[in-house]
């Protein structure tokens, strides 16, 4: 009992954390290669080579950083990604932690991500990192409402805040068709949460790397892995909330889940490569005035759909 | 049991994140102070970065608190929504409408402009 209820779930999450981050790194390199970016070495080995290189590099330091917070922030972000992965259901029974309130837990992961990313920018005690942190807070506080409304929308037909129930409620029709506004809005949230591509305001190039501008070596490795793992956790949540999770013909459930997660990852990474970064001063207006009312509409749509 | 699993996942991943940083770095000498100057595009810092700073989007964060409180009601509401039917729709509709007036007012006041 201890083995099946404690050891195996933990092992599953840890496995997903490492394999997921590796898959993101490979996919991103493949997409970059398809767009003509020069590749150094093999795509499959390059992430591991970079990881090993970062491990041996000297870690940078600033004059008076908040040491504890500076080392803790990447690890905390990784822990948040792990918790997100723990609530993703792979089949009816194959879930690391099948909490009754897993949607709420994911919501808290999103909220705490803002705190952790700000902590990372703040603790370096450097101007550019701090600006990245402040920018991220503006973005994080703007997208969180959109995410919450969209997720409440998928909880309505399920009559539950449990991801396994949310998936089970999509037996007849997936939420991506039933609530057409949901997935596009949620994908924007995903890009925001991992500050990826067009919503990379925290670690952007115009801030010389933003919150990550002062880190090198092992801390940077943890930070990069945590970001990639968070993207995987997000794609798992998106696949189970909108794409019917483990459901599908012929193939076994976990395999369908993996295919759907890969599809979401591919779309996110492609968007990250294709779209330009939006201006930070515009993103707050865009989120509150355009996207938030759209998420209201999504919620009303979901509510009417659930009652009919 | 599920919460215990979650706690172990949290502790293990946090520990792994710290270990990957600590193990390679424990024998590294710390850089000298000239090397540790924060990157400012070639300039030298006159003060801590943690000096007082006016966050221009501050009113937006206050507006968020109103909505975050609303989310607290919305989670249980989502579970009983189908059971309560139209009553739940009207109640949350009214609540959201009142909050939306707040957004429109904040928009007019330029809260989302961030300048």
Image (spheres, coloured by chain):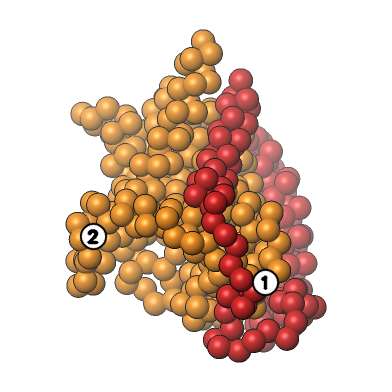
Chain colours: A orange, B red
**In-image side of A191 versus A262 (left or right):** right
Tell me, yes or no, whether dots 1 and 2 are on the same chain: yes
Q: Residue furthest right?
A: B52
Q: Position of residue A88 (x, y in %)?
A: 46, 36
Q: Earlier in the sequence, mark 1 or mark 2?
A: 2
**Looking at the image, residue A230 lies above or below residue B103:** above
Q: Which residue is mark 2?
A: A30
Q: Position of residue A106 (x, y in %)?
A: 57, 44
Q: Secondary structure at mark 2?
A: helix
**Looking at the image, residue A209 lies above or below residue A95:** below
Q: Residue at x 31, y 63 (%)?
A: A270
Q: Quadrant of residue B31?
A: bottom right
Q: Position of residue A294 (x, y in %)?
A: 53, 64
Q: Residue at x 19, y 57 (%)?
A: A42
Q: Which residue is mark 1?
A: A63
Q: Chain of mark 2?
A: A
**In-image side of A91 versus B61 (left or right):** left
Camera-nearest label, 1 or 2 = 1
- Mark 1–mark 2 Cα distance, whole angstroms, equals 38 Å
Q: Quadrant of the N terminus of chain B?
A: top right
């Amino acid at each position: 009992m201890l083995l099946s209820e404690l050891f195996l779930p933990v092992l599953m999450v840890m496995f997903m954390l490492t394999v997921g981050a590796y898959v993101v790194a490979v996919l991103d390199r493949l997409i970059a290669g398809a767009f003509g970016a020069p590749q150094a070495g093999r795509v499959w080995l390059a992430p591991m080579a970079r990881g090993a290189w970062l491990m041996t590099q000297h870690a940078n330091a600033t004059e008076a950083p908040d040491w504890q917070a500076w080392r803790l922030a990447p690890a905390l972000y990784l822990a948040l990604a792990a918790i997100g992965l723990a609530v993703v259901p792979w089949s009816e029974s194959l879930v690391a932690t099948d909490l009754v309130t897993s949607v709420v837990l994911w919501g808290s992961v999103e909220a705490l991500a803002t705190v952790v990313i700000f902590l990372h920018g703040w603790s370096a005690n450097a101007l550019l990192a701090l600006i990245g942190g402040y920018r991220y807070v503006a973005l994080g506080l703007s997208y969180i409402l959109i995410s919450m409304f969209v997720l409440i929308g998928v909880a309505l037909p399920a009559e539950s805040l449990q991801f396994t129930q949310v998936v089970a409620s999509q037996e007849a029709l997936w939420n991506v068709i039933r609530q057409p506004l949901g997935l596009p809005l949620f994908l924007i949230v995903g890009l925001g949460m991992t500050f990826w591509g067009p919503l990379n305001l925290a670690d952007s190039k115009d801030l010389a790397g933003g919150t990550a501008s002062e880190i090198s070596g092992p801390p940077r490795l943890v930070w990069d892995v945590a970001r990639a793992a968070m993207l995987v956790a997000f794609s798992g949540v998106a696949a189970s909330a909108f794409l019917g999770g483990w459901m599908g013909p012929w193939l076994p459930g976990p395999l369908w889940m993996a295919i759907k997660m890969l599809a979401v990852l591919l779309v996110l990474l492609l968007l990250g490569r294709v779209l330009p970064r939006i201006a930070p001063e515009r993103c707050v207006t865009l989120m509150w005035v355009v996207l938030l009312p759209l998420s209201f509409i999504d919620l009303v749509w979901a509510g009417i759909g659930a009652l009919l | 049991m599920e919460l215990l699993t979650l706690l172990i996942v949290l502790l293990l991943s946090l520990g792994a994140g710290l270990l990957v940083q600590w193990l390679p770095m424990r024998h590294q000498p710390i850089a000298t102070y000239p090397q540790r100057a924060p990157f400012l595009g070639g300039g030298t810092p006159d003060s801590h970065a943690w000096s007082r700073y006016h966050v221009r989007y501050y009113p937006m964060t206050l507006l968020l608190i109103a909505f975050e409180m609303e989310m607290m009601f919305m989670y249980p509401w989502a579970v009983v929504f189908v059971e309560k039917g139209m009553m739940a729709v009207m109640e949350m509709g009214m609540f959201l409408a009142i909050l939306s007036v707040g957004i429109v007012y904040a928009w007019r006041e330029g809260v989302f402009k961030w300048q």
